[in-house]
Amino acid sequence: MENSGITYEVCCLEETDSTNADVRKAAMEQGGHGLVVTAESQRAGRGRKGRTWESAAGENLYFSLLLFPEFAQEKAAMLTLTAALAVAEAIRECGIDAGIKWPNDVVAGGRKLCGILTELGWRQDGRYFVIVGIGINVNQQQFGAEIQDTAASLFLITQKKQERELLLAAVLDKFAVYYERFSRCGDFSCMRTEYEALLVNRGKEVRVLDPKGEWIGTALGINDLGELLVCSEQGCVEAVYAGEVSVRGIYGYV
Ligand code: BTN
C-alpha cells in the first residue's frame, strides 16, 4: 500500500496479545518503517496509563504502526496528535461529527470512539522507533460496565455496519499525508489549523489534572508543540504538556 509519504506493509493477525507488542518485537528484528499489524482481537490490548483496552473479536479495528522517523525523538510525542487528526478526519468521512479531545482521544457526542497509545523503543544499533497503536470502536454494539457511559462506536452512532478495511485505509492514507507534513515542518505548525478545527475542548472550561495540583481554565487551542493552551481563572495562559497532564470537561469526560 503506497501513498505520498509512507509505504505500508500490512500484516493481519486473527488473534494476538497486543499489536503494539507485536510491532515492538518486529522493530527489534526486521520490521521496517510503515509496518502495520492489525488483529481481529487482542487478548491483552493495552491502553494509556497502564489501563487495558477492551478488544472484542471481529467488530473493531486494532492496529499498530511502526515508524523510524528522521526527526529527533523529542518530537515523536506529537505523532500521537497527528494520528488523532488522521483518525478523526477518516471517521468524519463516515458521516459522523467526530472531534478530538486533547491530546488524542477521538470522540463523538461526548463519548470516546478511538484511543491511541504511542510508545517509543530503541533498536540495538541505537536507532529509535515509534509505535502508534490505534483502537477504533467500529461495529461494537455493547460495552462493559466500566466504559459503557463513556464509550461509543461508529455503529451505535450511525446504526449502520461500517467497512473496517475502508476505514483502516482512510486512516493510513491521512496519517501518511500528515506525517509527511510533520516531518517537513518539524513541529505541529503545519496542521494546527486542521487539529484545532476538530478540537472539542476549544473554548470550553476544562479541569487540568496536573500531578502538582488540579486547576480549572478555558482551553484556547494548541501551540506548535501540540501543547494545550489553557487560560486560568486568573487570566494566565499556560501550555499544558500531554506527558504529565490530562484534562477533563467540567461536567464529564469531554
Ligand atoms: C487509550 O487508552 O486510549 C489507548 C488505547 C490504545 C488501544 C490500541 S488497540 C491497538 C493497539 N494495541 C494495543 O495493545 N493498544 C493499542
Image: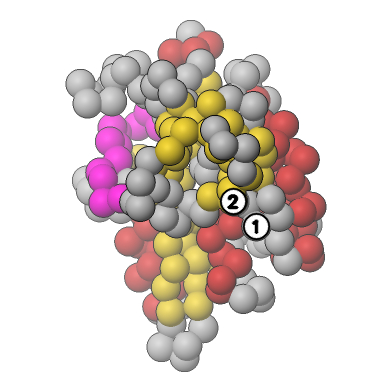
Label ID, residue 225 = 1
For disc 1, the neighbor class at 10 Å (few under 14, some 14 to 19, many from 20) is some
Examine the rendering and report whether any part of residue 209 can be seen: yes
- The secondary element bearing badge 2 is classed as strand
Cβ at disc 1 under 8 Å from ligand 1 = no
Q: In percent of the image, x 74 and y 39: which residue is there?
A: 194
Tell me the quadrant of the picture where the N terminus can be found.
bottom right
Q: Which residues are magenta?
A: 48-60
User: Would you say the residues marked 1 and 2 are in contact, meaning their CB atoms lie under 8 Å apart?
Assistant: yes
Residue 182, image quadrant: bottom right
Q: In percent of the image, x 66 and y 36: which residue is there?
A: 220
- At which x and y percent is residue 54? 28, 36
Residue ID for mark 2? 239
Label ID, residue 180 = none
Report whether 141 appears left or right of 241. Answer: left
- At which x and y percent is residue 94? 63, 22
- The amino acid pointed to by label 2 is Ala
Indicate whether residue 53 is drawn in magenta: yes
